[in-house]
Amino acid sequence: MIPFELIDHTADVGIKATGEDLEETFQEAARGMFSIISDLSKVERKNEYKFEIEEDNLENLLVSYLSELIYLHEVKNALFSDFEVDIKSKNEGKTIKAKAVGEEIDLDKHDMDTAVKAVSYHELSIDPEGEIKIILDI
């Protein structure tokens, strides 16, 4: 099983992420998104950022999770290569406790390939058994 693969899409890029469970699949979606931005093999584990998000369903949770990672990338000038998530049901929704690990962007070290502007709901699908398809605006 391939953890993630890029999917061609007009003017955007899609990710199909797979994992053993929902948490691993969310992590692979994040890894796939950052592989579009830069070469993850050059990103060291120097800094970690933790955050928690609560949403009413899995689709909103995924979009909010990836959107928060884009925000951290832009605001902290950081690239991430490792991700940990814990997803739980809470009240009538879902919550995610997330950690992203990486380092500050160094243009002498990191090639910036493609900027990811936003996460789209277009063609979004989540199989809780371990597959996500999502389109990113680039």
Image (cartoon, rainbow, N blue to C red):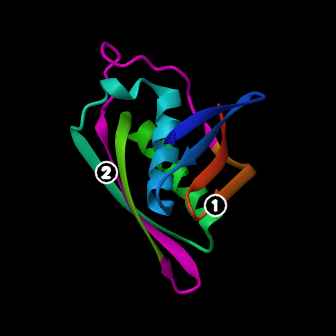
Q: Amino acid at mark 2?
A: Tyr
Circle 2 packing at 10 Å, graded few (<14), some (14-19), many (20+), is: some
Q: Residue at x 61, y 40 (%)?
A: 15
In the displayed structure, 70 sits above or below 26; it is: above
Q: Residue 1: percent from the left, percent from the top?
A: 51, 43
Q: Residue at x 48, y 61 (%)?
A: 21
Report the front residue among 58 and 56: 58
For numbered disc 1, what is the local secondary structure?
Answer: strand
For the C terminus, the image quarter is: top right
Residue 19 appears at what percent x and percent y?
49, 52
Q: Which residue is mark 2?
A: 49
> Magenta span covers which residues?
89-118
Write down the quadrant of residue 10 in the picture.
top right
Is residue 122 found left or right of 65 in the rendered image? right
Q: Seen in the image, is 132 located left or right of residue 88?
A: right
* Among the 4 quarters of the image, the one containing residue 23: bottom left
Instruction: Identify the residue at image location x=62%, y=71%.
Output: 57
From the viewer's perspective, tell me whether residue 48 is left or right of residue 57. left
Question: Which mark is drawn over residue 127?
Answer: 1
